[in-house]
Amino acid sequence: MIRLIDVYKEYDNGTKALKGVNMRIDDGEFVFLVGPSGSGKSTVIKLITAEIAPTEGRLMVNGYNLNNISPRQVPYMRRTLGIVFQDFRLIQKKTVYENLSFAMRAIGASSRELRRRIPYVLQLVGLEQKADRYPGQLSGGEQQRVAIARALVNNPSMIIADEPTGNLDPQRSLEIMMLLERINELGTTMLVVTHEKNLVNRFDKRVVAIENGRIISDKTGGYYNGEKI
Amino acid sequence: MARRFDAGYYFSEGFHSIFTHGFMSFAAVCMIVACLLIMGSFSLVAVNLNDMLGDLEDENQLAVYIDDSYTEEQARALEEELKAVPNVTNMTFVTRAEALDTYQQSHNNVELFEDLPDDVFRDRYYVHIADIAQMAQTKANLEQVEGVGDVVAAVEIAEGFVLVRNIATGVALVLVGILLVISLFIIANTIKLATFYRREEIAIMKLCGATDGFIQWPFVVEGLILGLTGALVAFFVQWGLYQLVGKVIIQGNGLSLVTMIGYTTLIPTILPVFCGVGALIGVGGSLLAIRKFLQV
Ligand SMILES: Nc1ncnc2c1ncn2[C@@H]1O[C@H](COP(=O)(O)OP(=O)(O)OP(=O)(O)O)[C@@H](O)[C@H]1O
Ligand SMILES: [Mg+2]
């Protein structure tokens, strides 16, 4: 579960990225976070992953209170989250399988756990045939599937995706969204940042709209719930 | 999920990392070797001088001559007072008759020296001291004692040795200090380079929830391997160098005055010290470089 209560974020250079954001995401939900460029979407994500700290306001992530979390606890908080980026962030010199095992090893998983978990996750994202390929030998959509598999491999309770389809054509984007929907149906909470109206409107999900650092709408249905389109 | 100390993983990561920036690793090892060699060479000189100084302390004693006017009884009575002088460890009393005997014997009973009256010699103590560096002071103190005529001691030789030893030790210490700092700096830069090569992987590890310890260990192992490699290379080079110097000294002078301790007898000291310093530089350098990862 995620809770943001009256969160403000002012960057060092004085930019006020968030101006009093309240948001609550319960376990099992699928939430689109939408808004124009510069509205503060990535800032929300970085606050949740404890990459940055809020200037003001309270922040809870999966039982961790980020306002007074100790640095030693941050890695354990992050293990409850799987994070996916627009630019995939795969290790180019490692194969698909190695990219996943790298993520599992990073939190101290054993070889047995690796052998059990990785084939399952690869099958879930439809890449079981390409385990030995390098990222450079895969299409953009496939690379993003690897990134999603990596986010999933440590069995987080929530996946956070910041513009996961930003680099993909509409057809691949749709496939990725459907994959995320499927993963959500299997029980993983999903927070997806995007500004692709058409894509959002194809799914009947909760949509939180942010503009200029404030939440301007939070409803189930289409992008901005049709109010501004 | 299990939290274990996966030594195999840290070792293989650290080991492979060395070769991704081979030249820098090579430079770092060379630096450690140079540091240890200079440190080792000066220490060996100091150790050998100390050893020779030890011989000197055994042989070299102060001769304390008792005033002519004192009877043997009176001379013997001075023992307690002489013993109370600081730095004096033990002494032997030799009467003038005994001294004459020894003298005549050492001159093969040459006729010229026979029939010498024994009052040519004086009663004397041969005094041993603890610290040769304080010989001059001890000599002066002994001379203060009532009834002591002269004190004869090879103060200059003792002081010369002590001076050379002190200089060697001082120079060694300063050089070692400077070189340690330089080596630490080089290692730190090598590891910094390693973290730069792996910044992408580090970012992903953090994202996945890797602890700082987990991220750091491979770099610590890398530093350790570099340090120990340098130590081993330095150990063998030092060995060769020492033998070479030994040969030159034996050929260069017939003086048996200069004696050298065998390298093999020094190995139990040199090897652990080299490895210890190498490991310290390696681990210290890598910790210095990855300190920033301590903060998330
Ligand atoms: N590190 C930073 N330092 C200073 N200002 C920043 C920083 N990161 C973001 N900002 C500013 O904060 C505001 C919100 O940025 P943010 O990245 O959250 O927007 P976004 O909604 O993700 O935009 P986009 O859709 O383009 O990714 C912007 O004005 C941006 O310029
Ligand atoms: Mg963004």
Image: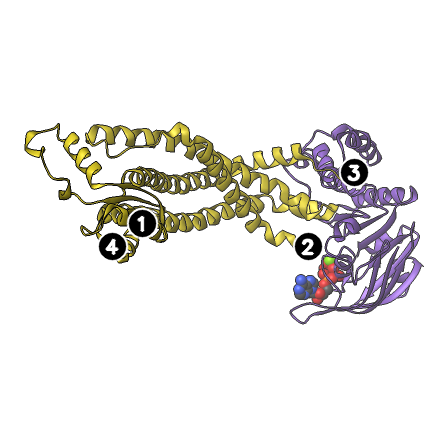
Chain colours: A purple, B yellow
| Secondary-structure class at tag 2 | loop
Tell me the CA gap for discs 1 and 4. Answer: 10 Å
Tell me the kind of residue under disc 4.
Gly
Residue tagged by mark 2? B296
Disc number at residue B77? 1
Q: Is residue A88 above or below residue A57?
A: above
Q: Are marks 4 and 2 on the same chain?
A: yes
x then y, percent, for residue B51: 34, 38
x then y, percent, for residue A183: 87, 42
Residue at the image point whose x is 69% and y is 35% from the top: B6
| Secondary-structure class at tag 1 | helix
Q: Give the crowd class for mark 3: few <14, some 14-19, many >=20 residues within 10 Å.
A: few
Q: Return the chain for callout 4.
A: B
Q: Is residue A164 left or right of residue B239?
A: right
Identify the image quadrant of residue B221: top right
Q: Is residue B104 left or right of residue B237?
A: left
x then y, percent, for residue A54: 76, 65
Q: Nearer the viewer, residue B7 or A175?
A: B7
Q: Give the crowd class for mark 4: few <14, some 14-19, many >=20 residues within 10 Å.
A: some
Q: Give the crowd class for mark 1: few <14, some 14-19, many >=20 residues within 10 Å.
A: few
Tell me the kind of residue under disc 1.
Ala
Of marks 3 and 1, the one in the foreground: 1
Dot placed on the residue nearer the N-terminal end, 2 or 1: 1
Q: Return the chain for callout 1.
A: B
Of marks 4 and 2, the one in the foreground: 4
Q: Are marks 1 and 4 in contact (CB under 8 Å)?
A: no
Residue tagged by mark 4? B147
Q: Nearer the viewer, residue A34 or B261?
A: B261
Q: Are marks 2 and 3 on the same chain?
A: yes
Residue at the image point whose x is 72% and y is 48% from the top: B207
Q: Is residue B268 left or right of residue B68?
A: right
